[in-house]
Image (cartoon, helix red, strand yellow):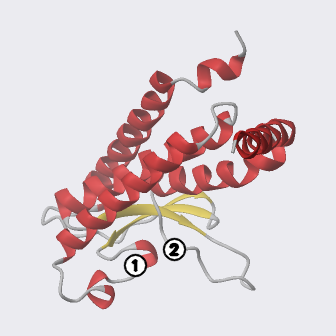
Amino acid sequence: MKKTDFINKWPFHLGVILFSIVADQLTKLWALVRFTNETGAPNHETINVIGELVRFQLVFNKGAAFSSRPQDLMPFLPPWLFFLLISIVATIVLLWFYKSIDKRDWMSRLGVVMILGGAVGNFIDRMRLSMVVDFIDCDFPDFIMTRFPTFNVADSFVTVGVAVVILSPIILKKIHQEIKNDKEAKTEAAKEEK
């Protein structure tokens, strides 16, 4: 049994999803307890983790990705319904994509699972709090932007998951070539049957 056989099974994938949700929700709970006052408002404190490069600071994101507002995109829908519909559509698309990935491409399957786990973490915030709790604040060289938008553990899972899916054809080049060859052979066989 190869190492990748274990990583490619649904119990492991379910575990990754549950781990990402629990890690995300626990760290957000910590941020809420640590960075709010008795009224629940942010206390504007900052904890430097790696100097000014990485720090923790509470920010509430009431919008969508990068603080974009759902009211600007679909003003006829209440925000909670907008996020519910977007989450349902995104989940269906991710599950369809997951099922369509050849089982030999364990990296892409793992990446999709990470994206799904992160998306569920932020969805829980939106349904529970009507906003997302962000607290990880990173600096970038000034020629790119002053600071990267504040994010959370769920966002990290989504970002790493996307990177894993993108890198899979490069890292698993041989496997992707096998999958491509098999598809071409099946297409040729189907043409010959007609």
Quadrant containing the C terminus in the rendered view: top right
Q: In 3D space, how far apart are the residues under numbered discs 2 and 1 (Cα atoms)?
A: 9 Å
Q: Residue at x 70, y 18 (%)?
A: 3
Which type of secondary structure does the marked residue at label 2 adopt?
A: loop
Question: Tags 2 and 1 in contact by the CB under 8 Å rule?
Answer: yes
Residue 22 rendering spot, x and y as whole percentages: 36, 38
**In the displayed structure image, the side of residue 136 where residue 71 appears, left or right:** left
Rendering quarter of residue 53? bottom right
Mark 1 nearby-residue class (10 Å; few <14, some 14–19, many ≥20)? few
SS under mark 1: helix
Residue pointed to by mark 2:
149
Q: Which residue is mark 1?
A: 67
State the residue in front, 20 or 55.
20
Q: Is residue 173 left or right of residue 58?
A: right
Tell me the amino acid under the disc marked 2: Pro
Please tell me whether residue 59 is drawn above or below residue 27 in the rendered image.
below
Q: Nearer the viewer, residue 30 or 123?
A: 123
The answer to whether residue 43 is above or below residue 176 is below
In the rendered structure, find residue 177 and report the number of the disc placed on it: none
